[in-house]
Each structure stands twice: as structure tokens, then as C-alpha cells.
Amino acid sequence: MRFKQELDLYLQFIKLEKGLSQNSVVSYENDLRRYLDFLTTEYKFTDLSGVSLTHIESFLDFLIDNELLSASSLARNISSIRGFHEFAMVEGYTKANPAELIELPKKAKKLPEILNPEEIFAMLDSPDTSKPAGIRDKAILECLYGTGMRVSELTDLQTDRLFFEIGFIRVIGKGSKERLVPVGEHAQDALEHYIEHVRPLFFKPEKAEKAKNKVFLNQRGGALTRMSVWNIVQKAAKAADITKNVYPHIFRHSFATHLLEGGADLRAVQEMLGHSSILTTEIYTHVDRSLLHQVHKQFHPRA
């Protein structure tokens, strides 16, 4: 039962927060079901807490020995397992990620898809702010783009972590790591308007303990879920006539890319995103090569 619960939650996470397509989700599900069946059959595990690197390597040897996968499919299986174990660790199901030392086959990193500023602005302007839910939705979209927060960080955001007097939000990220993120004028205005005029309408005293002072509430007084945020983003994308694959995490990609294209320091963006390694942040420096050509042409003596 534990395996099924952990897998179901992970599949929901990669669909709603990571924005993977239904085909990708099905592929990951097939990979992980085979992996969990192996752990159950060979080692009698019922949850991830006792799984070690040795067990994972044994599973990969099984796949290779039986020639069940192509090289690209094997790489995807490794990626699936690493992501699943990382999710389990972040969510508190296990204390460590035994798969983090497994190296993926070398291949070019896929650049994250982003929205351009005009597309972002169209989505930010799409909620109907004549209605309470629209005011909340605008605050959510402004907060995602204005801070680069992950969806899980946004849904976990609490009222005592807002420091509007200095223009910062205290974000609790992966592994319970804390960071201070500038909120930005537009996002702060939208948040303050929502908190002052709409949140009191949604707040239900009988659900106060369950909501735990969460900033974003649904209209029944409960804490907003990842699924709700995904739906809000989808609705905004449709209203803005955007045909790209739009999902909550694309705001984070766009946030980082737009800052770096505007000349922001890489280390500062790393800190705002909460990346433990600057190598993770560096991928955003490769998104728009045309900007580099423009700078080179403008400033190089031999251009």
C-alpha cells in the first residue's frame, strides 16, 4: 500500500508541478511500476525507506541482462528512479536519496521552454479581477512570475512569511531549506490586495487549523492544492490564447531566463531560485543565444 501511495503522489507531482505530458507520465509510471515490482519480488520491500544504491544497481543489472531496454529507455529509467527517490526524500518518506549517485548517460541537456514577456503579461492580465477568485488568481500568477517560486512552495506559503515592509518573502524550499526572495512591486501589490480584500472572504474559522495560516485559500476556506494552481494556470493560458505547453513551472523557467537576459548576476539568480548548485542555474544562460550574438556584435572590437 505504501508503494502505491508514494507512486500515485509522485505521478501527480510530475504532471501538475513539472508539467509533463500525459505520454511522459505514462512512461514514468510504467518504468516505476516495473522498478517497484522488482523491489517487492526480489527484496520484499513495501516502501522506499530501506532501499539502497545496491538494490537500485541490481534492478538496472536486471534490465541490462535481460535486454529489456534501449540505451535511451535505460537513461529514462534511471531518471525516473532518481526523481522518484528525490521526491520521496523531500516529502519526508525517506531520509536519503540512494539514487543520486547513479550517473545518467552523457547527453545534451534539454533547454527548458519559456514564455516571452508578452505572453507572461497576457496571462497576468487574464483573471477577472471583478470577482474575488480572479483577484486571488492574479495574485498567484504574479507571485509565481515575480518570485520564481515552485508550486509546492507557493501552496505552502504562510502569512507570517510575508515581509512586505522590506519587499521579501521567506520561502521554504526543498529539504526545508529557507531563502529570502524579493517579491517585486507588482506581485506585492497583487498579494496585498488579495490578502486585504479576498482572503477574509474565503477564510473559514472551522478550517483554520487545517489551512495553517496558508496565504492562498480556496473558496471553501481550505488550503489551495497543486491541482488548483495547475487549473488556474491552464485557464489563464487559454484566456491569453497561448498555444505552448503551459504549466506552473514554466513561470519559474521564465523568471530565471528573463532576469539573466536582462543582465542579472548568475549567483543572485541561483540564490533566488534556491539551487544548491550553480550548474543547475547555468542552463538558463543558454536559452537565448541571440542575445549573446547581439552583445558580441555590439561590443567586440573585431565585430
Image (spheres, rainbow, N blue to C red):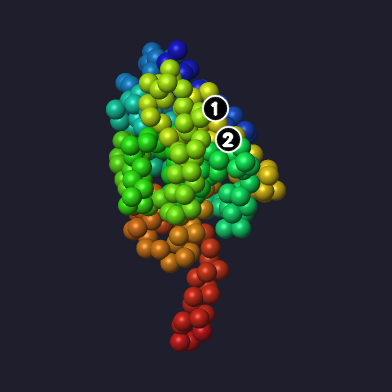
The answer to which of 262 and 72 lies nearer the viewer is 262
For this orientation, the residue located farthest to the bottom is 301
Residue 28 % position (x, y): 54, 31
Q: Which residue is located at x 37 percent, y 21 percent? A: 209
For mark 1, give the secondary structure: loop
Residue 181 sits above or below residue 213 on the image: below
Q: Position of residue 95 (x, y in %)?
A: 29, 27
Above or below, 207 relative to 108: above
Label 2 crowd (10 A; few <14 / some 14-19 / many >=20): many
The correct choice, above or below, for 175 with respect to 119 in the image is above
* Left or right, 204 with reference to 278: right
Residue 144 visible to an observer of this rendering:
no
> How far, Cα to Cα, is label 2 from label 1?
8 Å
The three-letter amino acid code for the residue at tag 2 is Ala
Kind of element beneath mark 2: helix
Q: Residue 258: x percent and y percent?
A: 49, 59
Compare marks 2 and 1 and give the one earlier in the sequence: 2
Are the residues at dot 2 and dot 1 in contact (C-beta closer than 8 Å)? yes
The image shows residue 46, relative to residue 302, as above or below, that is: above
Measuring from the top left, give residue 272's x and y in whole percent.
Answer: 37, 51
User: Which residue occupies 53% across, 23% down?
Assistant: 220
- Residue denoted by label 1: 219
Picture quarter with the N terminus: top left
Front in this rendered view, residue 173 or 67:
173
Residue occupying the point 43% across, 67% down: 263
Q: Nearer the viewer, residue 248 or 195?
A: 195
* Residue 220 in view of the camera: yes
Q: Amino acid at mark 1?
A: Gln
Residue at the disc numbered 2: 133
